[in-house]
Image (cartoon, grey):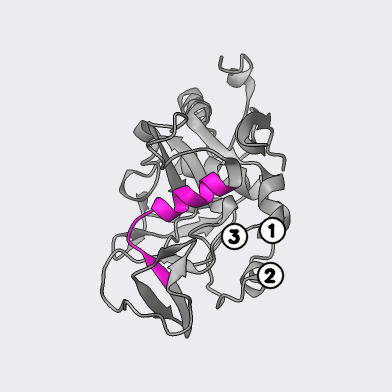
Amino acid sequence: MINESIDRLSIKHPITNDFLSKKDKNLIENFFKNVYLIDPDEISENPVIHPEFVRIASDKETYSKPNYLKNTFQGKKWSRYITLNGNEYRAAKNNVRAKYAFRDYTNVNLTNDKAPNRLYGYTVAHIFGGADNPLLFSAGFNLALILDGFVKFNEQHLNPQIYWALTSATYLLNRNLLENPQNLYEMFEIPFEDKILSPLFPKIVNNKIKKDKFKIKFQKVDPFPFWFDVKVIKKCVANYKITKIRPKI
């Protein structure tokens, strides 16, 4: 049920300072009913599951024989590698490796069709994008489980207020990690890339979202003020449990 006091909540748009409408507030709260983040305690123990992976959809500049990585991963032969900024990575063509990372953090089965607990109808999405960044491809703070019908919250189908709330949620839950992201790059020996890991809102110019080569440009803003809890998933022996946490500013 939507918070009965939602009419009395005054939330300012982070750019225009106009107050969000009741419709906007309802839309944001309803979106989070179909979103699951990873429990921050799980992430703090291991911020990035597989820092040797990046998503590279094209075969361009990839090669099949690694220069220094083992040619097997978890007992299976890996076939695509790429060198970026002097470092070698395994190149994944899609987001399946991100689904495996989500499983490793939570025990949620998103890939094994033979198991009876296979979860259908949900997709693992990258909150800040950056799947071609080895830090962000399998980072727990960058992964959200979202109902398929709601997953296109970003890129061409971006809803700016929802994206602001989503980036705020993961930032507030994992603030100790994200306040200085350079420490993460150093921890996993990954060349630093200046990617803003904070509450984000698209840059607006002449009432239009600013883009650079079809990619939306974002800016750091103050966190979204949550009046409701968000769902998080935590490992529980061989299963998992879902709890709720209020992201606090």
Give the distance between the C-alpha atoms of the residues marked 2 and 1, in whole angstroms: 8 Å
Q: For mark 3, what is the residue?
A: 48
Give the distance between the C-alpha atoms of the residues marked 2 and 3, in whole angstroms: 12 Å
Closer to the chain start, of discs 2 and 1, is 1
Q: In percent of the image, x 63 and y 46: which residue is there?
A: 223
Q: In percent of the image, x 72 and y 39: which residue is there?
A: 248
* Quarter where residue 169 is shown: top right
Q: Mark 3 is on which residue type? A: Val
- Structural crowding at the residue carrying mark 2, measured as other residues with C-alpha within 10 Å and reported as few (<14), some (14–19) or many (≥20): few
Q: Under tag 1, what secondary structure? A: helix
* Quarter where residue 234 is shown: top right
Instruction: Give the magenta part as a residue range.
Output: 90-104
Residue 163, position as x, y percentages in the image:
48, 44
Residues at discs 2 and 1 in contact (Cβ within 8 Å): yes
Q: For mark 2, what is the residue?
A: 183
Which one is nearer the viewer's eye here, 2 or 33? 33
Picture layout, residue 77 above or below residue 168: below
236 part of magenta stretch: no
Q: Under tag 2, what secondary structure? A: helix
Q: For mark 1, what is the residue?
A: 177
